Amino acid sequence: MRLIEHFIAGTTARAAARFCGLHRNTAAYYFLRLREIIAYELEAEIKAMFGGEIEVDESYFGGRRKGKRGRGAADKIPVFGLLKRGGKVYTKIIPDASGATLITIIERKLVSDSIVYSDCWRGYNLRDVSDFHYFRINHSELFADRHNHINGIENFWNQAKRHMRKFNGVPRRILGIFERMQVEI
């Protein structure tokens, strides 16, 4: 029970093991199992579609900080996210940030007539998105224009990276568990 309390509090497995008087591998094992249980329970919700005002964006996790950053950086895992304003976030690990990959996910997860907000990444303009009301924000000019912004999903990426930073990196197989999770914000 104390491990669950530490898991909920966001304590690292190593620190939780120290506080509970357990071996670090035991705490890491239980933390992993808790994440798998959460992902399993959320499987049904993932199949649900999003509707309303949706912000879409991609981000890159992991890798070294040296060299190129953002798109095209070596050893980084691209993750695509959809945020329903005032609702949930859906994330998916993607092989690349190409238009074919991104638009396919958008079409599968969104109800037609949804309002979609994105940045001006060229991956969003390869295919027809006539089923949606589509707005883009050019970050080189401004970050928000009244309702036209993607600040919610950008904030989610910032919070996720800040939370994961204390773990000194997350292996790709563990990050795959988060792929199946939908988070209430």
Image (spheres, grey):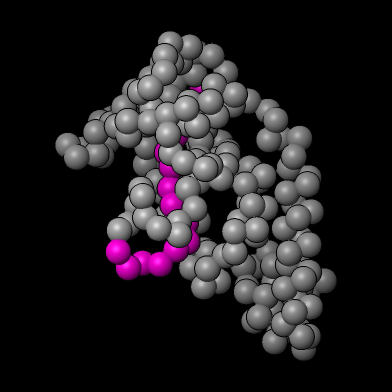
At 59% from the left and 59% from the top, the residue drawn is 172
User: Is 60 inside the magenta-drawn segment?
Assistant: yes
Q: Nearer the viewer, residue 50 or 9?
A: 50
User: Along the horizontal axis of the image, is 14 left or right of 71?
Assistant: right
Residue 77 appears anywhere in the view? yes
User: Is 23 inside the magenta-drawn segment?
Assistant: no
Taking 24 as reference, is 165 above or below it? Answer: above
Taking 103 as reference, is 17 above or below it? Answer: below
Is the C terminus in the top left, top right, bottom left or bottom right quadrant? top right
At 69% from the left and 79% from the top, the residue drawn is 16
At 47% from the left and 48% from the top, the residue drawn is 78
At 42% from the left and 14% from the top, the residue drawn is 128
Image coordinates for residue 23, horizontal then vertical, percent: 76, 85
Image coordinates for residue 147, horizontal then vertical, percent: 33, 28
Q: Which residues are magenta?
A: 52-67
Image coordinates for residue 44, horizontal then vertical, percent: 76, 35
User: Residue lying furthest right in this view?
Assistant: 1
Q: Nearer the viewer, residue 82 or 185?
A: 82
User: Along the horizontal axis of the image, is 99 left or right of 47?
Assistant: left
Residue 54 appears anywhere in the view? no
Image coordinates for residue 86, horizontal then vertical, percent: 51, 35
User: Along the horizontal axis of the image, is 2 left or right of 177?
Assistant: right
Taking 15 as reference, is 101 above or below it? Answer: above
